């Protein structure tokens, strides 16, 4: 456990315990407490990583491996956007306001635990805590869709946990301990790595299911579509990325794919990543529900991260880490905008919407920024991470993979353009006549995230320095 | 490592029994039972690994934590099951098809 970041785990957990008692008779106090906790954490993190002396020194003194710090920042950023959005989104009638914020804060604590831990068993514990909070959050509004999504999530992630446990036990038997460091040392020695690689492959299989990579993606669109609107932003933006994709990137670096150890696992992971990119993008093309299309797009973007993690060269890991962060920013904007649409127009069915740009200009243009970033249009942040990934593929001689990844970046642009034309541009529909722009507090998170997307894209040299420090530390 | 094969054959057998149970049953409750069997096999694997590596104390410590977590997860799953039953009046997995596209 990285002790420097422990406070980011304990404080939200403490707030989660306090909220139900303090806000028992005053539901609005729950909003305030949750937002203040996350905002304070974020301000603290910004000071830790972005103070001038730190930037001038090339981020050489960041604590830990830097990867944890970056992801903790992403977790707090997304969670703050979601809680701020929820504070104005939740109708007065919803009975469980306190429970809702408590669960969000527990999931923040669990995610922080996942990214700061340094052994596999703790990782497993926090991933399970995260899964339980996700089931409860998905069913917040007790709709039929939410319960169905949560059940499918449950039935696919639980066997994944069993596979992770079997992987853990084989690892314990062959390695004698479960810490990351031991695995790293073992993999850099010359001892034949058969059983250890097998154990790691079992764990990877579990995490691949948990992150919704293609052959195991059945739960992802249902859970995202059925979930309560702000929760789907939380889930797609950060929860599944931390509970699945983070662990994949971590194990990929520990197995030292770039040394040519565990080649079979590396190739398998890259193939699954590519399959995800292709299937996710093609399925997104023909969706009619806005949220479901975003879910398939999420599968496709996770494919890029898994592809880069499977390649495992330092440049690819940089791309993966960077894309993980970018994915959190742009997917949060898109899902929050879909929630705004649901509130303003009462539906997210793309066939019933149209011409929403006229009543909702802010929602429309933040969506444009986010979708251009997802598709990798310069100078937005998504362009740089995809560039790094494709360059890494090309450099390693995997030309076919690089070309396919590039082509499906264009397909990404295609399905988002179809979405934008159907929902925001084009002829005014009946829904657009009666709809009006949502209030300013509901727009603020999307605008903030769009600003982050543009800022990270434009200030790429600084961010590149940071990500390079991260990649160097986690690989060496 | 002779005892290795025997124990792990059994564990694999139990695990695939669980998966088979999940595969063939239509009722969500039966699927949950299948899941439980799978996760019990995984726990047996852990304790067996601890015994084989002469590290039983460590394995037991992990296992107790794991049991606690598993109880929480199963409780959450059962709550979902009950909610679903109240909504549909049935526990049939094939009726969960309102979300598609």
Image (tube, helix red, strand yellow):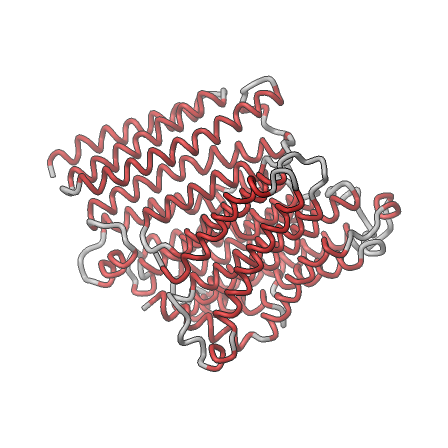
The residue most toward the bottom is A56
> Is A307 drawn above or below residue B49 in the view shown?
below
Q: Which residue ends up furthest to the top in the rendered image?
A: B89
Q: Residue at x 52, y 41 (%)?
A: A134
Q: Is residue A41 left or right of residue B17?
A: right
Q: Position of residue A405 (x, y in %)?
A: 53, 60
Q: Nearer the viewer, residue A225 or B5?
A: A225
Location of the C terminus of chain A by quadrant is bottom left
Q: Establish if A416 lies above or below A152.
A: below
Name the quarter where the N terminus of chain A is drawn.
bottom left
Name the residue: 48% across, 59% down: A72
List x then y, in percent, for residue A433. Answer: 88, 47
Residue A452's place in the image compared with A293, above or below, is below
Q: Who's the residue at 62% across and 21% down the image?
A: B88
Question: Where residue B21 sits: x, y (%)?
Answer: 40, 23
Q: Place residue B51 in its image quadrant.
A: top left
Q: Is residue A142 left or right of residue B25?
A: right
Q: Left or right of A35: which side holds A169?
A: left
Q: Nearer the viewer, residue A56 or A94?
A: A94
Q: Is residue A70 left or right of residue A93?
A: left
Of A348 and A2, which appears nearest the observer?
A2
């Amino acid at each position: 456990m990285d002790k420097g970041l422990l406070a980011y785990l304990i404080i939200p957990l403490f707030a989660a315990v306090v909220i139900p008692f303090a806000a028992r008779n005053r539901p609005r106090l729950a909003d305030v407490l949750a937002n203040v906790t996350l905002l304070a954490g974020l301000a603290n993190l910004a000071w830790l990583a972005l103070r001038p002396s730190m930037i001038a020194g090339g981020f050489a003194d960041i604590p830990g491996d830097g990867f944890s710090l970056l992801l903790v920042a992403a977790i707090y950023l997304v969670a703050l956007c979601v809680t701020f959005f929820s504070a104005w989104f939740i109708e007065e009638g919803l009975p469980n306001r306190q429970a809702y914020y408590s669960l969000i804060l527990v999931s923040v604590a669990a995610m922080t635990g996942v990214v700061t831990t340094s052994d596999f068993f703790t990782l497993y514990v926090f991933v399970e805590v995260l899964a339980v909070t996700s089931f409860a959050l998905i069913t917040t509004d007790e709709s039929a869709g939410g319960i169905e999504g949560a059940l499918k999530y449950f039935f696919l992630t639980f066997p994944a946990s069993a596979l992770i446990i079997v992987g853990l036990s084989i690892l314990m038997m062959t390695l004698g301990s479960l810490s990351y460091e031991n695995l790293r040392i073992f993999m850099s020695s010359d001892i034949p790595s058969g059983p250890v690689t097998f154990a790691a492959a079992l764990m990877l299989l579990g995490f691949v299911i948990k992150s919704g990579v293609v052959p195991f993606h059945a739960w992802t669109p249902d859970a995202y579509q059925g979930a309560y609107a702000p929760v789907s932003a939380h889930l797609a933006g950060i929860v599944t990325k931390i509970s699945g994709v983070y662990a994949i990137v971590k194990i990929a670096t520990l197995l030292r794919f770039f040394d040519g150890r565990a080649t079979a696992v590396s190739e398998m992971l890259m193939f699954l990543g590519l399959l995800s990119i292709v299937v996710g993008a093609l399925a997104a093309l023909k969706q009619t529900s806005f949220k479901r299309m975003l879910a398939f797009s999420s599968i496709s973007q996770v494919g890029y991260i898994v592809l880069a993690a499977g390649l495992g060269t330092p440049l690819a890991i940089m791309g993966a880490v960077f894309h993980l962060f970018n994915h959190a920013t742009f997917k949060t904007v898109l899902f929050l905008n879909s929630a705004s649409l649901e509130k303003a127009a009462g539906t997210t069915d793309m066939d019933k919407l149209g011409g929403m740009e006229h009543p909702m200009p802010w929602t429309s243009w933040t969506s444009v920024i986010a979708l251009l970033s997802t598709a990798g249009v310069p100078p937005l942040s998504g362009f740089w991470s995809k560039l790094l990934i494709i360059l890494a593929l090309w450099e390693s001689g995997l030309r076919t993979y690089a070309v396919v990844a590039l082509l499906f970046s264009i397909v990404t642009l295609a399905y988002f353009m179809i979405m934008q034309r159907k929902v925001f541009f084009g002829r005014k529909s009946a829904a657009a006549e009666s709809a009006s722009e949502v209030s300013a507090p509901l727009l603020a998170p999307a605008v903030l995230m769009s600003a982050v997307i543009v800022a990270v894209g434009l200030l790429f040299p600084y961010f590149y320095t940071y990500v390079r420090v991260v990649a160097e530390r986690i690989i060496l | 490592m002779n005892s290795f094969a025997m124990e792990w054959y059994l564990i694999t057998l139990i695990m695939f029994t669980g998966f088979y149970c999940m595969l063939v049953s239509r009722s969500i409750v039966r699927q949950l039972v299948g899941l439980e069997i799978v996760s019990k096999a995984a726990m047996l694997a852990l304790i067996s690994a601890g015994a084989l590596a002469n590290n039983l104390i460590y394995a037991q410590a992990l296992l107790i934590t794991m049991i606690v977590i598993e109880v929480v997860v199963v409780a959450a799953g059962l709550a979902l099951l009950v909610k679903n039953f109240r909504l549909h009046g049935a526990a049939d997995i094939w009726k969960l098809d309102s979300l598609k596209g």
